[in-house]
Amino acid sequence: MVLCVLKRRLLRSSSCAFMGRLQRQSRGCVYSSIHGFSHEEIREKLQAFPGGSVDLLKHDSGIAVLTINNPARMNAFSGSMMVDLKERVSQLENWSEGKGLIVHGAAETFCSGSDLNAVRAISNPQDGMKMCMFMQDTLTRLLRLPLISVALVEGRALGGGAELTTACDFRLMTSGSVIQFVHKHMGLVPGWGGAARLVRIVGSQKALKLLGGALKVDPEFGLDIGLADEVLEADQGAATALQQAENWLSRYTKGPVPVIHAVKKVVLAGRELPLSEALRTEKEVFGTVWGAPANLQALASKSKHK
Ligand SMILES: CC[C@@H](C(=O)O)C(=O)SCCNC(=O)CCNC(=O)[C@H](O)C(C)(C)COP(=O)(O)OP(=O)(O)OC[C@H]1O[C@@H](n2cnc3c(N)ncnc32)[C@H](O)[C@@H]1OP(=O)(O)O
């Protein structure tokens, strides 16, 4: 018995070290100085474009709410909001009790993409690339959080706002809402990682239509192509869209924190890694929950899965 416990502890410590490496790697994420990416340099440049905020509220339930808050500009991202977003993602990476995340916009609309005033000021290729790398890095880290995340889409999610919805695990759309990748109308393609994630969500054929046609995705169309996971009807009694979203998400975040984190990590591995690596990661993650308190408690309770 002692040998078994020691073996489990050794496995758990090695798998924690492995998962720590994976987590640090994912935090280091996509770009570094070898790509000409200087976090401090672009951060300073973006801070020069103030306005709005990205607010984070963490609930005892383990579900946090991230609010894109710039209603005067249809929640468009100013430069300082891009910096805010990275800071909130960093806070969430360190939230040990977190299980779920809802991303939504203030004033019942989602996000209108980049603030066009800021875009005009950084329209030179060098600065555009730096903003692109900054936001790709941030949204990749958002998607890789050990939390189950939902984009609650009310009103409009346009351009970078549409891309932001793809950086969450799920998308819930309210009646009358629209997701639209308007980039083509601006002579652009997605620059915040939205194209790469959209292909993984709906497949390359549908992604090509959405981007090539800058198609408006309403809730019905979103469900049909797999971009939306649920449509929230307005007449749900007194429950606001946010409360409905929290109810929806809580189905998947119910349970011990380590188990919810493990669920997200094995799905992330399956989604991002080649099969052999994904299997090895699954084994490592399995080692952190096998014989852990939640597992032993379930075994002791002889729970029936009705
Ligand atoms: C990588 C992608 C990324 C990038 O390339 O950097 C982008 O996301 S580029 C931006 C893509 N987004 C857009 O092109 C959306 C532009 N906005 C609109 O199409 C419309 O505003 C709307 C969102 C459809 C809403 O239209 P409407 O209901 O008619 O309201 P208004 O147009 O009057 O908007 C109210 C108010 O908000 C300002 N606004 C809206 N969007 C932006 C934005 N993206 N940047 C800056 N300001 C924005 C708009 O100018 C109005 O302000 P006032 O003019 O001061 O009243």
Image: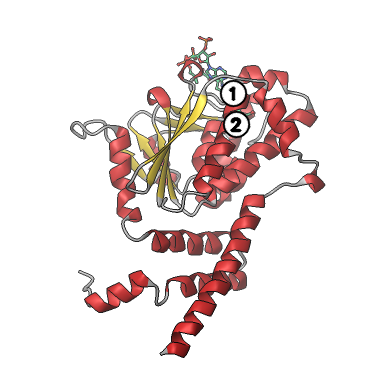
Q: Amino acid at mark 1?
A: Ser
Residue 177: image location, x then y, percent: 39, 30
| Residue 82: mark in rendering | 2
Question: Ligand 1 is located in which of the four quadrants?
Answer: top right
Is 227 above or below relative to 117? below
Residue 91: image location, x then y, percent: 52, 43
Q: Determine which quarter of the picture holds residue 275.
A: bottom right
Is 96 above or below relative to 42? below
Q: Nearer the viewer, residue 5 or 55?
A: 5
Q: Determine which quarter of the picture holds residue 46.
A: top right
Q: Determine which quarter of the picture holds residue 77.
A: top right
Q: Say which residue appears at 45% left-offset and 29% top-offset.
A: 110
Query: Which residue is disc 1 drawn over?
Result: 78
Q: Say which residue appears at 64% left-offset and 43% top-offset.
A: 137
Q: Residues within 10 Å of mark 2 (few under 14, many from 20)?
A: many
Residue 303: image location, x then y, percent: 22, 73
Q: In the drawing, does residue 86 fall left or right of residue 157?
A: right
- The residue furthest left is 237
Mark 1 to mark 2 CA distance (whole Å): 7 Å
**Do the numbered discs 1 and 2 sit on residues whose CB atoms are within 8 Å?**
yes
